[in-house]
Image (spheres, grey):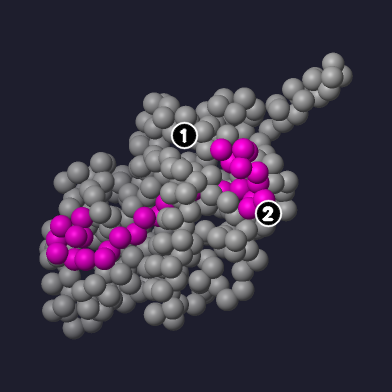
């Protein structure tokens, strides 16, 4: 026993990994890095962020599934890689509901619909009514086919019966630039991505795609408040581990995540970054995953969406 104690102590200090399926510097990576340091303190072991970008998030997911199911490798996933990809792609090397086990939600990222500041519409209801009168459908940008901004636009189209011209970009940065420049009329985006442009007066926020207003934009009403139903697009981020991970390991990870998300410094940094920090139980995240897999899958099928 005396010989094994140092080995166990050393093993407990081995770094854990949070695998990010996207490049460094993006929103998922940013949230992972904010959470990782404090999570390491709660787990009493270093936690590093390991970026595995490529193949629409497949590479990161596969890396986690090839790793030991012992809690040392954690996948941080957006709703896109967890709940949308399985319906968007005909062939996918993982099934989130079967192959992964939820640990905890860590952030909600609701979408805000922004338009060019020179447009006359002051809110989403006015934008919809003005769009009905146009001879040609207004051009609405997105970060790419099948992403949350695209699907939120389809929700708006489905709810109002107004047609829009979808203009997909390869990423959100150029889409936002072209809304500011007037090349396209508007875009759905995470609040964090467009908040600086809204505050600078270069974009106008006209509707929140969620059940409640966003704390960073308290004066912007939800679509529901404006009489437009079923435009609800939460680009949440959650933590997952391989499905074979033991109950006690998942319970310990969940407890550590919940303590991390209660840390004032962590919450402050996440809020300032435009996200809404939120921990959950394993069961709560499983319900969100199941509900969004069904919701987005039905919308993708109804509109025959295929990846580019």
Label 2 or label 1, whichever comes before in sequence order = 2
Quarter assignment of residue 177: bottom left
Is residue 48 shown in magenta?
Answer: no
Q: Name the foreground residue: 284 vs 82.
A: 284
Mark sitting on residue 299? none
Mark sitting on residue 65? 2
Is residue 238 shown in magenta?
Answer: yes
* Residue 284 percent location from the top left of the image: 43, 49
Tally the numbered discs.
2
Residue numbers of the magenta segment: 222-251
Q: Name the foreground residue: 198 vs 17.
A: 17
Who's the residue at 57% across and 60% down the image? 96
Residue lying furthest right in this view?
3
Who's the residue at 42% across and 55% down the image? 288
Residue occupied by mark 1: 258
Residue lying furthest bottom in this view?
135
């Amino acid at each position: 026993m005396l010989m094994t104690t140092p080995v166990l102590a050393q093993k407990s200090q081995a770094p854990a990994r949070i695998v990010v399926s996207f490049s460094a510097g993006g929103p998922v990576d940013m949230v992972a890095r904010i959470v990782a340091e404090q999570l390491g303190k709660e787990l009493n072991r270093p936690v590093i962020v390991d970026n595995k970008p490529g193949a629409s998030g497949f590479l990161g997911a596969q890396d986690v599934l090839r790793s030991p199911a012992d809690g040392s490798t954690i996948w941080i996933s957006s709703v896109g890689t967890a709940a949308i990809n399985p319906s968007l792609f005909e062939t996918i090397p993982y099934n989130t509901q079967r192959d992964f086990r939820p640990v905890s939600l860590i952030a909600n990222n609701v979408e805000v619909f922004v338009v060019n500041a020179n447009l006359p519409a002051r809110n989403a209801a006015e934008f919809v009514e003005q769009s009905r009168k146009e001879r040609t459908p207004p051009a609405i940008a997105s970060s790419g086919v099948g992403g949350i901004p695209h699907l939120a636009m389809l929700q708006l189209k489905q709810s109002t019966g107004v047609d829009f011209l979808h203009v997909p970009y390869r990423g959100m940065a150029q889409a936002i630039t072209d809304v500011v420049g007037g090349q396209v009329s508007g875009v759905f985006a995470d609040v964090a991505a467009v908040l600086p442009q809204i505050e600078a007066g270069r974009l106008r926020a006209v509707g929140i795609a969620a059940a409640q207003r966003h704390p960073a934009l308290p004066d912007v009403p939800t679509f529901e408040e404006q009489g437009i139903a079923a435009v609800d697009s939460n680009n949440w981020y959650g933590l997952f581990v391989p499905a074979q991970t033991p109950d006690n390991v998942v319970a310990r990870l969940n407890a550590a995540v919940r303590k991390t998300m209660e840390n004032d410094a962590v919450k402050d940094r996440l809020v300032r970054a435009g996200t809404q920090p939120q921990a959950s139980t394993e069961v709560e995240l499983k319900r969100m995953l199941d509900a969004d897999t069904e919701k987005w899958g039905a919308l993708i099928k109804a509109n025959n969406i295929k990846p580019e």
